[in-house]
Amino acid sequence: MKKWSVLSLSVLLSLVLIGAPVGAQDVIPIGVYLPLTGQNAFGGQLELDGIKLAHMEMPEVLGKKVELFIVDNKSDKVESSNAVKRLIEKEKVVAVLGTYGSSLAMAGGEVAELAGVPMVGTSCTNPLVTQGKKYVFRVCFIDPLQGAGAATYAFQTLGKRRAALLIDVASDYAVGLAGFFERSFVKLGGEVVAKLKYNSGDQDFTAQLTEMISKQPDILFIPAYFSEGAIIMKQAQELGAEFQIMGGDAMDHPDIVKIGGDAVEGFIHTTFPYDPSMQNMSPVAQKFTENWRKAHPNADPNVNAALGYDTYAMVLDAIKRAGSADPKAITQALAETKGFEGVTGSTTINATHDAEKPVGIVMIKDGKKQYIDTIEPQL
Amino acid sequence: MTSSMFVQHFLNALTLGSLYALIAIGYTMVYGILRLINFAHGEIFMLGAYFVFWGVVLLHLPWPVAVLGAILITALTGVLVDRVAYRPLREAPRISALISSIGVSFFLQNLAVVVFSAIPRQVYRPEWLTKVMIVGKVRVLPLTLFVPALSLVLMLGSIYIVYKTKPGLGMRAIAKDIETSRLMGVPVNRIISLTFGLGSALAAASGIMWALRYPQLQPIMGVIPGFKAFIAAVLGGIGSIGGAVVGGVLLGFVEIMLVAFMPELAGFRDAFAFVLLIVILLFRPTGLFGERLEDKV
């Protein structure tokens, strides 16, 4: 009985798979799943706008029209896997774009992997997203690269030699990123003079900071989220800390100056290499910025919009190189992506399906977020 | 450790400890009279801080006016919470009111997320309390000296109300026996409302001071301070107002000095605070200054 049902199911499934390309002769269906509501909606909306802009500029590939199918994953893991399932089974998409958020991407990636349809993550930096996956890729860099980028900038550009770390022990992101920073910084020849911990939700960091000041570091790396980061910087300022403070992409938030006030002045953090304030934009980034401003006269583009744009463009590039819209062929071509020129820099997909690209550096200067540098991390 | 570093740690501990003490006073007062551990205390604390933000930023009130207004509105909120969530359970077993207070806590927290949004807000800080003073190598905020003084004043004020005034007499009578107090003509509901109002006003005052020290408003900002104040209250002997102050200051010193002398254990700071709670409950459940528990809880 069970055998029969498995057999008939696989017959059905293969019928569906054979049927798919036949039914979709004239258009190439591409799925998008992003958090358009819920706690991650801020990032998801911007990424969708970026994807739509790219679609408007490049509506065709291989002489066929590309059709986008967009599903909201509601910032929820279960909704994410349902969204990918629906896109693949009902809309018969040949590739899936998304999503913002590592845990959401992990839930969706599981489904895409089983179905054998390529998925390209927009901004999900945890190494686990693509680990052991044949069909899952991403357009953003991962935390080992980001940590190395921060360490490289601190050591080589700023000339810092004595680093201190303040780590939230309850956050995977913070523990991971701090570890990668430390590894690279020590490898470059620097020294970690203090490594202190705290817990998510803590608001008093005076004891840790007083201890840290006594060790006289010249740079403090805090892989924190921006709300905690702002409090840490305020207390460091009140305690008279004189060292440079540096953070990761989680500190990238438009409200950081409003909340941190003058305590965040001079603060530096790593991010993806795009910001409308950057100098010497690549032609691709320039075109993106111009077209964005035409399409959204009242809103600035940001790094999430750029990543959304790049995700679509990279998949289209893969379809072009594959010469076919077959999911397997697209997967193959994605894996071979090398030096793809995106808004967020030149991107190469490595053996683990992660994007290798430069790391951007942002500084809070004169009460404003300013993009100051792009660097190649020394891994 | 250099001596200036120790002084810096000492001042950090004093600030944190007296903030805990300030929150614990309200906690312990409500418990002492009603035998109710009001888990919503941390959320009332959060509301107090937000109300000041509203007053200053949206209504452009001068800071002292905004503070007084916020304390008043928070006190009324406390009375309202009692009316809605605790009064209907007055005759029910105590555990029901306790569970209801946990419900209120979650409700207020999520309501704050909806109304205020989860995006952190900045805090207006009057300069006379937050301008850093540099003495030798030590840096100190006027707040560091102001908060302990405020804690002492509010402690004495609360003791005065409970022991020297007529409503205070009612409070003490209710603490002994609600039914008999009612029969003796004590306006039980009014006295209990007053107790909640007072407890909430204390929570608001502590929330406002906390926000000056840790200048960020978030709907969840009351959770951890609420737990810590609970530990402080138990440490001092729950129900004892003086005990809450001693317990709070002590807890602040334990936390800061742990990091000062054993920096590598900094990640376990909260764990130590809770271990302290368990140890006290096991070996000295009445805390440092508590009365003996007999038929309470």
Image (tube, coloured by chain):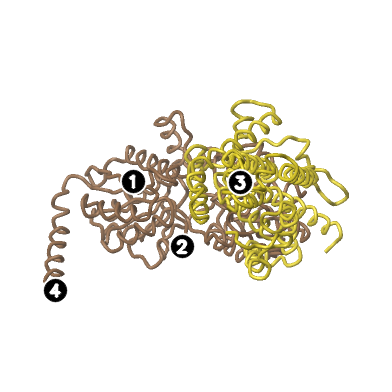
The chain under label 3 reads B
Using the image as rendered, state which of residue B100 and residue A156 is in the foreground. Answer: B100
Residue receiving disc 3: B181
Judged from the image, the secondary structure of the residue bearing numbered disc 1 is strand
Query: Considering only order in the chain, which callout, 2 or 4, is on the residue closer to the N terminus?
Result: 4
Chain shown brown: that is: A
Q: Give chain B's shade.
A: yellow
Q: Disc 4 versus disc 2: distance between alpha carbons? A: 38 Å
Three-letter amino acid code at the position of disc 2? Pro
Residue type at mark 1: give it.
Asp
Please state the chain letter of the residue tagged with numbered disc 2 in the rendered image.
A
Which residue matches tag 1?
A72
Eye-nearest disc, 4 or 2:
4
> In front: mark 1 or mark 3?
3
Say left or right for A95 vs A130: left
Query: Can you identify the residue that label 2 sits on?
Result: A127
